[in-house]
Image (cartoon, rainbow, N blue to C red):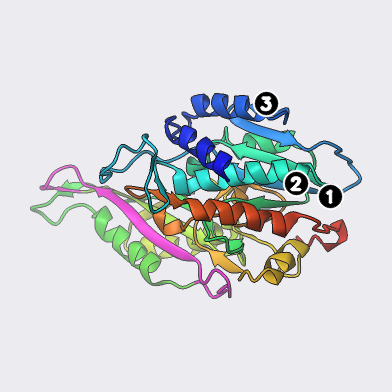
Amino acid sequence: MKEAVELLKKLVAIPRQSREETAAADFLMSFLDGKGLRPQREANNLWCVADGYDPLRPTLLLNAHIDTVRPVAGWTRDPYLPELTPEGKLFGIGTNDDGASLVSLIQTFRILSRRPQSYNLVFLASAEEEVSGANGAERALPLLPHIDVALVGEPTGMEPAVAEKGLMVLDAVVRGRAGHAAREEGLNAIYGALPAIEWFRTFRFPKVSPLLGAVKTSVTIVNAGTQHNVVPDQCRFTIDVRTNELYSNREVFEFISDSVRPIVAATGCTLEIKERSFRLNSSRIDTSHPLVQRAIALGKKPFGSPTLSDQALMPFLSMKMGPGQSSRSHTADEFICIEEIRNAIDSYVHLLDGLNICSSNLIR
C-alpha cells in the first residue's frame, strides 16, 4: 500500500491530460519494467501479461486509465502538487479518477502474478479514457491476448458496477428559410426546432432497465441566428443520449430519427440529424457470472453505473469496481483516502485470488 501511495504521488506531479499522457506513460513504463513485469506499449497504452500464459485457459484483464481531465477553476491547492494530510487524504489531480484504481490494480497484478491461478492475467493501463479517444484502449485491445472478462478500475466505492450506460452524441440541424423579421417572410428555423427539442425533453423510451433506468436524452447546445432582424434559416442543436443495456445506440438513433423528422416537417422545416459515433454502447455482465458471484459473497452489492468508462469499448464481459467515489471525479481539490487504497488492494486480491473463471459460464 505504501508503495502504491508513493507511485500515485509521482503520477500526480506529471501532467497527464487526455492525449497528453506521454510523460506519464514513460514514467509508468519505467516503473513496471523495474519490477520485472516486461511491459509492452502501443501509443501511450501499457500492458503486461503474467508469466505462464496458456491460450487454453480463460483470461482476466485488469484495466485502469492513466489520463485525467484538465483541472477546473475552483482548485484551492496546486493540482499537480500531491498533498497528504494528517487525516490520510491525498489531494491532487487524478487521485480519485483514476489514479487510486491504477496503482491498486498494479499492485494487485503483482501479487496475483506470484500465485498460481486457473486463469491468465493481463494488466492494461489505458490512455485517452476521459475523451474515449481512438488512441486509447480501442487501439490497445486488439493487441492483447484473447480476453474473457475484465475488471475495470473506476471510483465506485469498491462496489461492483455490473451495468454501465452507453453514450451517443447527436448533431441536429433544422433548416427553414431566411427573411426580414419586420415582415411576414421566411420560415423560422428556431420555431421548427422547438417541437423537436420538446420531444427530447418529454419522450420516454419504453424499455426501462432495473439497473440503469431509462434511456436519457438531453439537448445541451443550441445555436441559431445571425442578427436580430433576420429570420434564422438554420437552428443547430446537440443531443446527449445515455442508453441502457436494453437498446443498442443504433436502435435508439433510428427510433429518434424516425420520430423527430415528421415533427419538424409539420412546421414546414426540414431536419438533418447525424450521430458522431455508435461505438460507446451500454454494457452488462450477468450477476450469475463467477466474478460477480465472488463479489457478492464478499458482501458487495451490484449496481448500475450512469458514467462511462473504457468498458464501452470492450467486446467482452466486464465489471467495474474501484476505490474512491464518482462524485469526487472532475472536481476541484480532488482527493483519495489512503485507507481506500489499502482496502482496494485487499479487496481486489480477495476477489480474484483463486477465482474460477470457466469459459462456459461467460454469458454475453
| Mark 2 residue element | helix
Identified at 86% across, 58% down, the residue is: 358
Q: Tell me if 149 is positioned left or right of 32 in this view.
A: right
| Mark 1 residue element | loop
Asked whether 176 or 217 is in front, the reply is 217
Identified at 61% across, 71% down, the residue is: 301
Give the residue at mark 3. Answer: 33
Chain-order first, disc 1 or disc 2: 2
Q: Tell me if 211 is positioned left or right of 268 in this view.
A: right
Q: Tell me if 234 is positioned left or right of 17 in this view.
A: left
Q: Where in the figure is residue 171, as x and y percent of width and height?
A: 41, 48
Q: Tell me if 119 is positioned left or right of 196 in this view.
A: right
Give the residue at mark 1. Answer: 117
The image quadrant that residue 56 belongs to is: top right
Identified at 57% across, 60% down, the residue is: 158
Amino acid type, callout 3: Asp
